[in-house]
Image: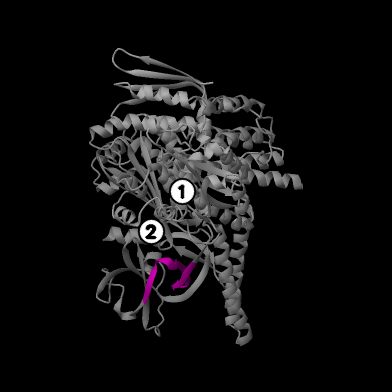
Amino acid sequence: MGQHEMITGQDGSARLCLSGNFGRGEALALREAFMALLDQPERLELSLRKVEGLDITFLQLLFSLARGAKESGKQFVLVDELPQDPLAQAMMLGVTASDLKSLG
Amino acid sequence: MTVDDFHRQAFREEAVDLLSELETSVLELEDDPGNLEVVNRVFRAMHTIKGSGAMFGFDDIASFTHEVETIFDKVRGNEMPVTKELLDLTLSARDHISLLLDHANEDVTRFLPEGEKILRGFRSLAGTSLQPDETPLSEPAEGQAPEISAEMMTYRVRFKPHPDFFASGNDPAYMLDDLRQLGACQVFAHYETLPPLPDLDPEQCYLWWDVILTTASSELAIRDVFLFAEDHAQISVTCLDDGLDSGPKKLGEILLERGDVRQEDLAKALAGQQPLGVILTGIGATREKAVASALAEQNTVRQARSAREDQATAGSIRVSSEKLDLLQDLVGELVIVQGQMKQGISLLDDPFLRSLSEQLERLSDAFRDSTLGIRMMPIGSTFSKFRRLVRDLSAQTGKEVDLITRGEDTELDKMVLERLGDALVHLLRNSIDHGLETPNERVHAGKPSKGTLSLTAEHSGGEVLIVISDDGRGIDPQRVRAKAVERGLILPDCVLTQKETIELIFRPGFSTAETISSVSGRGVGMDVVKRVIDSMRGSIEVESEFGKGTRVNLRIPLTLAIIDGLTVRVGDETYVLPLDYVEECVEMPCDADDGQDRNHLLHVRGNIVPYIRMNDWLHLQRDCDKKKMHDHIIIVAVDGIRFGLLVDQVVGEHQTVIKSLGPVFRELEGFSGATIQGDGSMSLILDVKALAQQISKAK
């Protein structure tokens, strides 16, 4: 079961930290968390260090978040990369290293 | 030799070739880490070494290679990136396998810690997902992508689920997994149809996929994967490689065919100079992912074709070089006997025997050409070894070097190549150690921090021209001269041209390096290099511009064994000229050269050509036959110098089997060998290059 925690800094930056497994059951809550992050005014940070598993819905939300941040002119930064196992899952689903690099 | 020994020896020879190919591929990956074709080549080499090694009892090699193979399976499956660390480890692994191979008949326990250290490095790179002995030493395990073979076909599967795909009880991940069961897959997700986050319904599927699948399964089997999903997705399966000989489609053709780019955008992009994929994404005509996917498709088809070609050439057999040497010697003897027979038969007035002799000569010619052809090898096999050398030397000296090679397909006799190898190594080492500057020095000199070292080969007449050039500091003639005086090689007041000064570096023991380095040794090499080149009837020439760089030209004969020669008579002796140098034969009235004219100049169709009177040069009596109306002058050309050789008689063309003069006469100037004539007599082979140098000096 995936969990998330939002940490906002005094400088206006916001960091969303994800942990656990993210599948279809967590997709709705994850979308809300991503939208809350997107509503933040300044630099948007996402930490994926504690993600243990993911599926297609997770990837859809992740790429949509990155695109939304870009379109609204906000800085989006992946502060920690995906650990080895979920990274392998993403790659099995056709996500390439350059896709992840383009996120932020 | 038992059958088992024979197979073990065959494995060793195959493994040496594979390790060489592996090294080349790893170095290629350094320049082009995204090249899946090369990744697959590395995988295939490891796979074959592992499989054959296990089969013939090389268990240490097989188990070590197995782990490296597993890593590269992950790389080709997009699960691991190609990084510098990975390539460094792979080169170390290659060296370790080579070491195990060299000591295969001994106890290799002492080498195992080093192997384990390399494997630990691989495991660390791969994270926790790689465990030793994860799969048995066998053919691909269940679920593991099989190696591409000639029987396989490559397909593009475009899989676009409808948004309600999840609601139908399906998950695209299952279909992708099922496709992986069928063969080697490259999966590309496309996400450009994703809606903005507020409009994104997490229960819907917005991603779609291109899968490049190489499989032995039929198209029907691929479609079966989507049996229960076809009403909820748009699916197309296209065979990309029908096995016909046409080349793999170009990127633009693939993108057009897929509908990922418009014809007009393509035409616009083609007017530019950059790679098509960069242009198309740059102008927004398509997405980077679409280009990456199309390039993967192109690479996979190319690789499948290459596998097919490999199988087509699998009909070749491996023959030891000793057997080839023996065959060449026998052909040489046959050519000599055939020449003797021809001469003997010419004395008999027998049309039947003459006809047989002519047939035998034709067969002998064809046999010679065929045998020499078998021995010819592309020089690229030698060049590829130098990439590693340059890489290691760059790391050792801290110099940045870009090695550019050209003319890898140029063929040379195997023996020439073997003898040339060490000389080239020395020249390359010299270029890196003495020629190229450190990055700081280069920047101060207004040059790019990375030096360029170029190694090229091309055919030039009956020779191969090999050029080693660098854009380093060049040779300082003042320093060379000072060092030569210091060493007592020349007198302080000796007058030399710049070219002659630079050629002092070929004198034994010459060295201008202020410090002795482990890279290019103790400066004892250039004279040895020259001696090796001379011994092959080749030549070496150095051109250098101080501060700009150095160029070394090597001219090497294609073969050392049998040449086409032109036999001439001077006095009572016969001599042979290599036919490759001969341009024409002209006649000159005997009274035109009375021996008093020291200018020795001949007018040939408006051009003045100097000539040498061979009688004088060889200190032989001139033919005083009063009936003789004409002298014969053979016009030859060497390195742009055109000159004539006045002889008494042109005997004719013959195949000439070159025999060494032996140590006693090796230093004799003007002769490059000897041959046995049809009548059993011996003739010396004239060293036309040495004669050209004399003409050049006389000028």
B633 displayed left or right of A92: left
| Sequence order check, earlier mark of 2 and 1 | 1
Q: Is residue B205 visible?
A: yes
**Percent coordinates x, y for residue B240 in the rendering:** 52, 55
Extreme residue in the right direction: B2
Of tags 2 and 1, the one toward the viewer is 1
Disc 2 on helix, strand or loop?
A: helix
Depth order, front residue of B498/B132: B132
Q: Residue B177 in the image: state x and y as whole percent.
A: 59, 39
Instruction: Tell me the magenta residue range.
Output: B564-585
Q: Nearer the viewer, residue B515 or B24?
A: B24
Q: Which residue is mark 2?
A: B690
Q: What residue would you read off at disc 1?
A: B532
Q: Same subunit under labels 2 and 1?
A: yes
Mark 1 residue crowding within 10 angstroms, few (<14) / some (14–19) / many (20+): some
Mark 2: few/some/many CA within 10 Å (<14, 14-19, 20+)? some
Q: Name the amino acid, label 1.
A: Val
B564, above or below B93, in the image: below
SS majority, magenta: strand
Label 1 resides on the chain identified as B
Q: Assess whether residue A20 is covered by the magenta stretch.
A: no
Residue B584 in magenta stretch: yes
Across and down, in percent, residue B482 comes to: 27, 36
Residue flagged by tag 2: what amino acid is it?
Ala
- Name which residue lies at 49% across and 47% down: B382
Q: Position of residue B77 (x, y in %)?
A: 54, 38
In what quadrant of the picture does the C terminus of chain B appear? bottom left
